[in-house]
Amino acid sequence: MEITAFERPFHAYLDEIRSITMIIPVPNQWNDRDSFTLITADEEIPLNIVEKIYFQEFIKYVCILQEDIEIGRQYWVLDSAKRKSDLQIGAITRTAEFDDLFYYSGSLGVEYSRNESAFKLWAPTASEVKLKLRSPSGDETRYTMQRGDKGVWSVTIHGNLEYFCYTYLVCVNLSWKEAVDPYATAATANGTEGVIVDLAKTRLPISPPPPLEHSVDSIIYETHLRDFTIHPDSGVLAKGTYIGAAEMDTKGTDGKETCLSYVKNLGITHLEILPINDFAGVDECGEKIEYNWGYNPIHFNVPDGSYSLDPRDPYKRIQELKILINSIHQNGLRVILDVVYNHVYVRETSSFEKIVPGYYFRHDTFGMPANGTGVGNDIASERKMVRKFIVDSVLFWLNEYHVDGFRFDLMGILDVETMQEVRMAVDETDPSVIIIGEGWDLNTPLSPEKLANMRNQKSLPGIGQFNDAFRDCLKGNTFNLYDKGYALGNVHYYEMAKQVISGSIGLETTGFGLFGQPGQSVNYVEAHDNHTLWDKYAVCLADEDKETRRRYHRLTTVLVLLSQGIPFLHSGQEFFRTKNGDGNSYRSATEINQLDWNRKIIYQDDVEYIKGIIKMRKAHRAFRFPSAELIRKYMKFLPVQRPILAWILEDVKEYGPWQSIVVLVNPLKSAEEVKLPKGKWHILADHCLSGTVPSQWSVEEKITMKPLSTYVIITNETKSMRNYSG
């Protein structure tokens, strides 16, 4: 019997394993409906009505079964007037019983060999599934798939299917939908079909990344792949592509290095790349006039084709991305991928929703899709097969592409257990892989204690969180451009500045800090989101001249690098990146988003200064203690006049070349004198120079700091702070 949604006299939904809900439209002439029967191919089962609720436009009946429904089998419901409707899969997919019944731990997707290819799709609510194959010549063939345990449909096709395109045709609730395999690893241009490829052909000799002892040893540099090379003066040949980002020895108009060569010499440890998995918003086959950050995920395990030299060749983007990652490794850097598992581009058209409707996304108490992400859908990571997909996907990028870290977009939408499983799964392969995320507190229908946000950091050891307290304390509130932070001399942020600079662990307080360990604090003042630091300072320091804003900006960046925790820089921050005041450039013009390599030339002295600070941080473990216990033991703030900040890392010779280190910060526009602990001190950094070679001259008793400056002084004498009073 064929029936459409428009022909159904009423709607019957399976909402729990033994509960069916009937929705009867009113007003209507069908008043005599107080009995219902479930019909199968070989029997009729009376339904027991346990609840009847009247609404303005419909009547709701809740019926109970004595036996479990066989999900995936076609059932019909007959009312007392002999009118029939199909039993549709309803809220059952959002129950714990469904999760337990259909959890599948095996592999999914396509397993390719030259002789045959095996296809497996998890679709427990489907009554039929077909595989649609399209040969390279365009011939189309459909194959009926067989249902197995846990709702997994499979079929094995003999012969060499390399380069064949494929999709799945899935029938749920009498409706057929065509979907791309969620586990696809290759796709056609613009992602309309999955493509069968031999990943072994794309593998390169592995260039191992440099060693990493602890996450606080990281210095992260975030960039967008197109921004990185697209500027006319970047010196890159293949601008805006994977291959272009892999180019070495590129030069700007001054004849000095740009792009990857520049980043290598800057001294950072990790290059973090905004999402490069297949996303919507840019026509891969067009002129690339569109721009997008990449937070519109379509296929989670496929590199995006807009960065490829040939998006129509499914192999090219895979090979080119691997060349880029290999090149980054060969230059002594590690790679972090920005991953977006918290939502999809469009819920209704996503493969997840087409294959298992209602399962992959959260819904509120009224059955409406949740929207904590602000983009119309929240991934239900707490469900077992969603969690499995996320873990499987992370491991795919780790093992196939050899990346070294993951930055989880809107991690606060995901649940704690999923992030714990990600951390454990990654640790089994490589414990040095860094995992960080945005632990914002977002309004999604999951118990607050289950969300992977900063509030629950105690349950997320080994996972870093972007520290918005650090960000807003130092530069001023991100969402109030006129607010001035500690780095601009605002004494109201003074005590908080001490906390965030010391790793947000609660140093010198009786309470607990924001985090338990410094490796949980990702310290930043600028990222791809919101205004750049330069653009914010152009507003809140509008009455200051450009030189003064420059010095404030550099002081703020230095604090990121000298604080305990994980420092994070936005690409170009060191040469005062601007987006011309655009605070949300996710799809703005290239001219707004591109990394202007000519600013590196203009502000070369500032770049060299930041390089010196980075060298300093890397030279001594005391700037990057891996535990709260070590910070509490060795780091002390000195009693100086506000808003001057001063702290000592005392008797730390076993962790680096200097016995004791004092950092002094002057966020005032006047020169300030600071009394020093007794002894001879040598300058590593002052208002204009920085590095790891101490000055030949010494200072004793006091030092006069230039306006808007940071000083780092060291001694190799054993210190005692008992008699220091400031």
Image (cartoon, grey):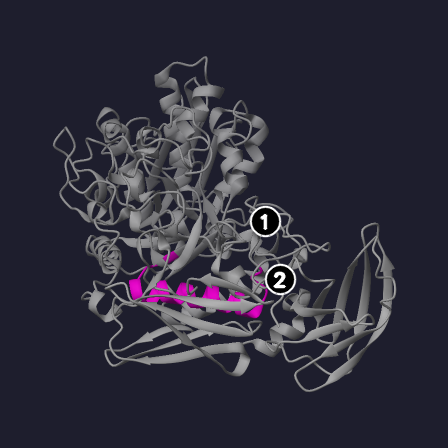
Q: Left or right of 147: which side holds 34? A: right
Work out whether residue 715 or residue 35 is closer to the camera in this orientation and state it: 35
Image-quadrant location for residue 37: bottom right
Work out whether residue 559 or residue 67 is closer to the camera in this orientation and state it: 67
Camera-side mark, 2 or 1: 2
Work out whether residue 376 or residue 209 is closer to the camera in this orientation and state it: 376
Q: Determine the CA span between mark 2 and mark 1.
A: 58 Å
Q: Left or right of 533: which side holds 656? A: left
Identify the disc placed on residue 180. none
Q: Amino acid at mark 1?
A: Gly
* Above or below for 416 versus 561: below
Q: Residues within 10 Å of mark 2 (few under 14, many from 20)?
A: few
Residue 447: percent from left, percent from top: 68, 58
Which one is earlier in the sequence, the residue at label 2 or at label 1? 2
| Residue 92 visible somewhere in the drawing | yes
**Residue occupied by mark 1:** 513
